[in-house]
Image (cartoon, rainbow, N blue to C red):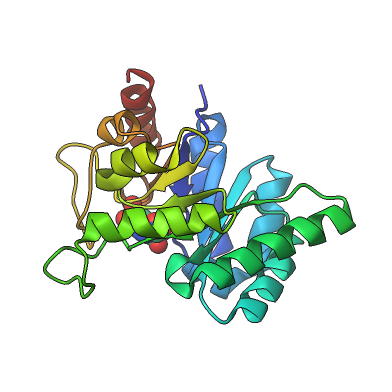
Amino acid sequence: MADERLIVALDFHKLADVKNLVKDLGDSVVFYKVGMELFYSVGAEVVDWLKSQNKKIFLDLKLHDIPNTVAGGLCSLMKLGADILNVHAAGGFTMMKTAAEALREESAKMEIAKPKLIAITILTSINQAEWYGAQNISEQVVSFAKIAQDAGLDGVVASPQEAKLIRENCGEKFLIVTPGIRPAGSDINDQSRISTPAAAIKNGANYLVVGRPIRAADNPKLATEKILAEISEV
Ligand code: C5P
């Protein structure tokens, strides 16, 4: 029943809340996202606990600093055993390339599996009116994706609205992870560039990150099952 394409965002402060939701969702979800809210409160313990439950982890800490600092930070995080790590593409080509090389070298030295490294393009909460760049959002997202690919990253985080363009420009093997997922009729919250789960998959997303539509639902398990059914029909 589980479908690895669904990543549930655990935006909690307490490990007890994580445990309740993960236990409630049971075998239907294998991939979870740990972001800054949870990691800054609970730390590595949450990663250890999720691993003890045989779950996969996207550690979404969005690193953005000079190349040497980001590379060192990622190597520290890699030792926790997450499956996906990320950086901001706005950190630049050299930062991403240095980070990707450091992860490759360090994982080989430690004889552990290298986590996927992906880049945040433009946050899904930003709309065209708020956007400050010279290019329009979708052009900028595609150029960030191409720079990330040239730097040796495995993929990007982008809005489902840009997934098709990224797929066309970066090919079939490049990972596209899309937050901003809102099942029809659900609350948009602070997101802007959204789509339904089915549309995101149709447009080429490999993974959907879903937080509040599951976490804040009256019945999170039912909300999850509806999303899984929707994507399995694509
Ligand atoms: O609750 P919601 O479904 O909006 O949660 C989306 C999750 O994806 C949040 O944890 C947020 O930090 C994350 N995210 C995002 N946009 C990005 C990258 C990550 O919304 N570009």
Percent coordinates x, y for residue 6 in the rendering? 45, 37
At x 49%, y 37%, the residue is 25
Q: Residue furthest top?
A: 233
Q: Quadrant of the C terminus?
A: top left
At x 80%, y 61%, the residue is 106
Q: Is residue 124 visible?
A: no
Q: Which quadrant of the picture is home to ligand 1?
A: bottom left
Asked whether, in this view, residue 90 is left or right of residue 64, the answer is left
Percent coordinates x, y for residue 45 in the rendering? 69, 63
Q: Is residue 73 above or below residue 221?
A: below
The quarter of the displayed image where residue 40 is located: bottom right
Q: Residue furthest left?
A: 129
At x 34%, y 31%, the residue is 201
Percent coordinates x, y for residue 175 in the rendering? 49, 42
Asked whether, in this view, residue 150 is left or right of residue 79, the answer is left
At x 14%, y 40%, the residue is 185
Asked whether, in this view, residue 59 is left or right of residue 157, the answer is right
Q: Nearer the viewer, residue 35 or 98?
A: 98
Q: Is residue 201 visible?
A: yes
The quarter of the displayed image where residue 80 is located: bottom right
User: How many numbered markers are drawn?
Assistant: 0
Q: Nearer the viewer, residue 80 or 173?
A: 173
